[in-house]
Image (cartoon, helix red, strand yellow):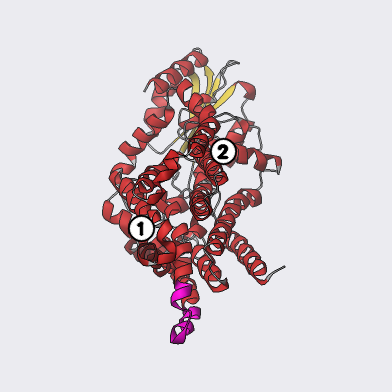
Amino acid sequence: MTKRTTILIAFILLKFLLQYLLISPQYELQRDEYLHLDQANHLAWGYTSVPPVTSWISFIIKLLGNSVFWIRFFPAVFGALTIMIVWKTITFLKGDLFACILGATGVLFSVLLRLNILYQPNALDVLCWTTFYYVMVLYIGTEKKKWLLVAALVFAIGFLNKYNIVFLLLGFLPAILMSPQRRVFKQRSFYLALFLGLILIFPNLIWQYQNNFPVIHHMKELSETQLINVKIGDFLVAQLFFFLGAAIIIIAGWYALLRYPAFAAYRLYLWSFLITLSIFIYFKAKDYYVIGLYPIYISFGAVYMEQLLQTGWRRYLRPVAIVIPILLFIPMYRYFFPNKSPEEILRKQKRYKELGFLRWEDGKDHELPQDFADMLGWKELTRKVDSVYSRIPAREHTMVLCDNYGQAGAINYYTRQGIKAVSFNADYINWIDLSHPYVNLIRVKTSGDSHDELQKTASIFNAGFIAGSITNRFSREYGTTIFVFRNAKTDINKRIAWEIKEEKRW
């Protein structure tokens, strides 16, 4: 085993160790993770929330036992592979061991540590962006046509994981047109690659068509409820934090693409960055959508800095360049990760607010960062719903109806009573089983007017009462109430079917 390989393995092992250490056991899974895990029970070529790759990974996790260890494992794998791809890119660009270590350090001690904590499509999205850029570096450097086919395969996997990768092409193709590489459009292999990519993503496109393109509805909903609160200033400031320790390396990469003769063939990567970032800004995208843009520029920057710090007094700056990302990680460690209890965060709330970490998607500041608040209260909710469910006769005729996908997914993950909770929210609206009659209803409702809910729903049942609520004040679900309604006076199934039809119509 070579020295390079040994050091790369050490980086990968450190990556895994950090991913498991940077989250306190006080926190549970995040609301999105429950939905993604439940998709393993409803395999399809598409979902309202995400494309199908996440469900395939969830199915593997299910086969492995559905434990938190394996849920954390896959995002960590994708993060480790991102480090490896950056390492491989540096090696291909003829970077030495120092450049590889510098690049790996910049990627390791970055926002990816935060991103790779959660089981979401974002970790694989960043890996796919980085791999696509790497493969195109190989194509430009070797002009071997096979790399175009590999790029198409990588894009297809990325597309079937998260549609965000479309923005990569929207930035990369115009950049090719602006460079000598435009001759690729005259090659038969380019169109074979396009055809391969289309064939691979075609099942998902068919699913979208058959389901009236829910991705469009999803984007519209995002635009109206979340993206409307995105401010360009906040978006740009966030970019500085993502790879703060590697900022000098990234800037060096941009400069090298512009001026370093050895990178002249790759200059299109600079234009690609500017075009892609401009598109994200125009559409007021969430700041973390852009993370996949940066790792490839760490590769270019690391190779250039190796040349810059090669001789004379500058070579003494090499250890400093490696230490900078580690030193800048220290304040990140203190505030970026769910490794502090809610009480500790509350004591330092002023600092969290100054850093903008308390601002949620609603544009307002709260007590905890949104992701942290989304990782609390789920076990309490399930325990109370399980308790109520176990005491209801004819449980097979009892529906557990939740307000949102987080509630339904968490109950289905933690339940000890075999509950199959549903919701009119996200993918759950397609998973409601009306093949047998319901006579009882357990209603999990986000905090609101409890009296109004009792009056409105109890009228179609013979009995109704409040069974409990979420009492964890730090949870985003704080105040969520559990209602129990028994012995329906009317046909619940017909009423639910009508509600499903109305929700889908809107």
The outermost residue toward the right is: 1
**Quadrant where the N terminus lies?**
bottom right
Looking at the image, residue 241 lies above or below residue 277: below
Residue at mark 2 = 53
Classify 10 Å Cα crowding around label 1: few (below 14), some (14-19), many (20 and above): some
Report whether 368 appears left or right of 22: left
Kind of element beneath mark 1: helix
Residue 329 at x, y percent in the picture: 47, 69
Looking at the image, residue 308 lies above or below residue 191: below
In magenta, the rendered stretch is: 305-320
Magenta segment includes 272: no
Q: Amino acid at mark 2?
A: Val
Residue appearing at x 37%, y 35% in the figure: 219
Image quadrant assignment for residue 196: top right
Residue at mark 1 = 238
Report whether 334 appears left or right of 55: left
Residue appearing at x 40%, y 28% in the figure: 453
